[in-house]
């Protein structure tokens, strides 16, 4: 489904894709004030991102980063700091020469204050310098001060380093500070990623030592994730196999039921098409037929043992003629006047069966008016029909 032509959202699709690509590389961007709209939308979707809601209880959804042995827990992990965060200045204005000169003086002053461990004052002075001349390195230095304060402010430091890296993605100092800040929060994988890149850009023993500590935890988490992914994949495969088995069993059951139904219908059709022995009405001592004596059990047995008689009873025309005789036994003349009686097959069969019933050779039907020789139209049993 596509948006209708002219929809106002269409002009923002490409820029939205680019923004999402940037955020996927660094989810900590969502903690910035500018992404308040995104945090609100995420909450509306019912998605819980613990680092966006530090005040919420995470016991229901344990964080894999925290699932390490007690003896391996870094004693320097601290509680996440919350707003208000230090003011950030945009990079969208052109500083004057005086701005550059004044900013340099402020940065020197801030560095001196930091060395004197006057961190609050250093933070304030760095902020003044950033308002005059926004600089990636100045943001990184202010982030360093934020980690030196008591209590430490790692979330605020991460925000400053992320701003610095937006301006200069290869800032080794910003990567080192952000890696350290993530370590203080127990975000081992994020810390390892930053420290690896920092060591590649600007190696030093202190950062490498920290990277090794972080990597130990990050690798453990990676193994746990791999095990969780393997288990999840196995569960999905088992569920898929179960669904396939259920579908197969349902199809086989439906096939068996269909075949059984077909067999039942076939058997019923065969039964209905095959007349039972002695199925001719009135044959058990056929009364009359114009004074024709009824047949006893011996006479009936003789009829049923004659293959020609039994074969003739399978002929629909003969059965129709017999039915007409049986429905009007008191007036065989009327029955014999029916056109079907002129059929050669019917005539010959009637001659034969009457001879059997009379116990003699074929001839006139005893007791029937005029016998077979007096059938309407003067037909003798041996005559042919035009």
Image: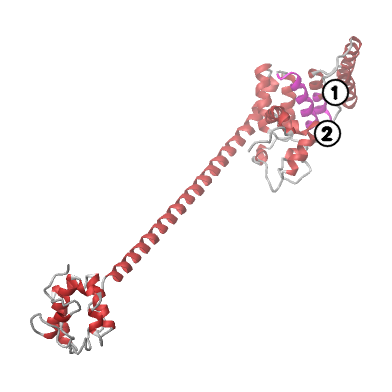
**Which residue position is annotated with label 1?**
89
Quadrant assignment, res 258: bottom left
Residue 368, horizontal then vertical, whole percent: 18, 86
- On whether residue 152 falls in the magenta region, the answer is yes
Residue 168, horizontal then vertical, whole percent: 74, 18
Quadrant assignment, res 282: bottom left
Quadrant assignment, res 105: top right
Vertical placement of 275 versus 29: above or below? below
- Tag shown at residue 151: 2
Q: Quadrant of the N terminus?
A: top right
* Direction top: furthest residue: 97
Q: Residue at x 46, y 54 (%)?
A: 246
- Tag shown at residue 219: none
Vertical placement of 376 versus 266: above or below? below
- On whether residue 192 falls in the magenta region, the answer is no
**Is any part of residue 183 visible from this angle?**
no
Task: Tell me how the rendering is colored.
Answer: secondary structure
Magenta region, residue range? 143-169
Q: Is residue 120 left or right of residue 241?
A: right
Circle 2 Cα neighbour tier, 10 Å, few/some/many (<14 / 14–19 / ≥20): few
């Amino acid at each position: 489904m596509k948006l209708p032509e002219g929809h106002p959202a269409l002009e923002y699709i490409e820029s939205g894709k680019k923004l999402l690509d940037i955020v996927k590389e660094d989810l900590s961007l969502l903690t910035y004030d500018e992404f308040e709209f995104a945090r609100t939308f995420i909450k509306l979707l019912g998605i819980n991102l613990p680092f966006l809601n530090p005040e919420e209880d995470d016991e229901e959804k344990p964080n894999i980063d925290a699932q390490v042995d007690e003896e391996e827990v870094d004693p320097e992990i601290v509680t996440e700091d919350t707003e208000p965060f230090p003011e950030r200045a945009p990079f969208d204005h052109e500083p004057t020469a005086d701005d550059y000169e004044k900013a340099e003086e402020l940065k020197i002053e801030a560095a001196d204050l930091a060395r004197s461990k006057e961190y609050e004052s250093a933070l304030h002075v760095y902020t003044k310098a950033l308002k005059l001349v926004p600089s990636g390195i100045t943001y990184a230095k202010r982030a360093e001060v934020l980690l030196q304060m008591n209590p430490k402010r790692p979330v605020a430091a991460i925000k400053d380093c992320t701003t610095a890296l937006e301006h200069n993605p290869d800032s080794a100092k910003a990567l080192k500070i952000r890696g350290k800040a993530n370590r203080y929060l127990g975000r081992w994988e994020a810390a390892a990623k930053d420290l690896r890149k920092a060591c590649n850009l600007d190696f030093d023993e202190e950062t490498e030592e920290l990277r090794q500590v972080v990597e130990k935890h990050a690798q453990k988490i990676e193994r746990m994730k791999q095990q969780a992914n393997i288990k999840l994949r196995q569960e999905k495969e088992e569920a898929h196999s179960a669904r396939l088995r259920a579908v197969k069993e349902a199809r086989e059951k439906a096939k068996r039921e269909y075949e059984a139904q077909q067999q039942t219908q076939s058997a019923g059709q065969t039964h209905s098409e095959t007349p039972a022995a002695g199925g001719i009405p009135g044959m058990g001592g056929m009364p009359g037929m114009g004074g024709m004596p009824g047949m006893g059990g011996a006479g009936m047995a003789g009829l049923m043992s004659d293959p020609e008689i039994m074969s003739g009873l399978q002929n629909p025309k003969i059965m129709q003629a017999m039915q007409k005789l049986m429905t009007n036994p008191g007036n065989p003349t009327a029955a014999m006047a029916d056109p079907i009686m002129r059929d050669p097959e019917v005539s010959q069969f009637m001659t034969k069966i009457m001879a059997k019933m009379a116990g003699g050779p074929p001839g006139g039907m005893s007791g029937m008016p005029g016998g077979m020789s007096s059938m309407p139209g003067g037909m003798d049993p041996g005559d042919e029909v035009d």
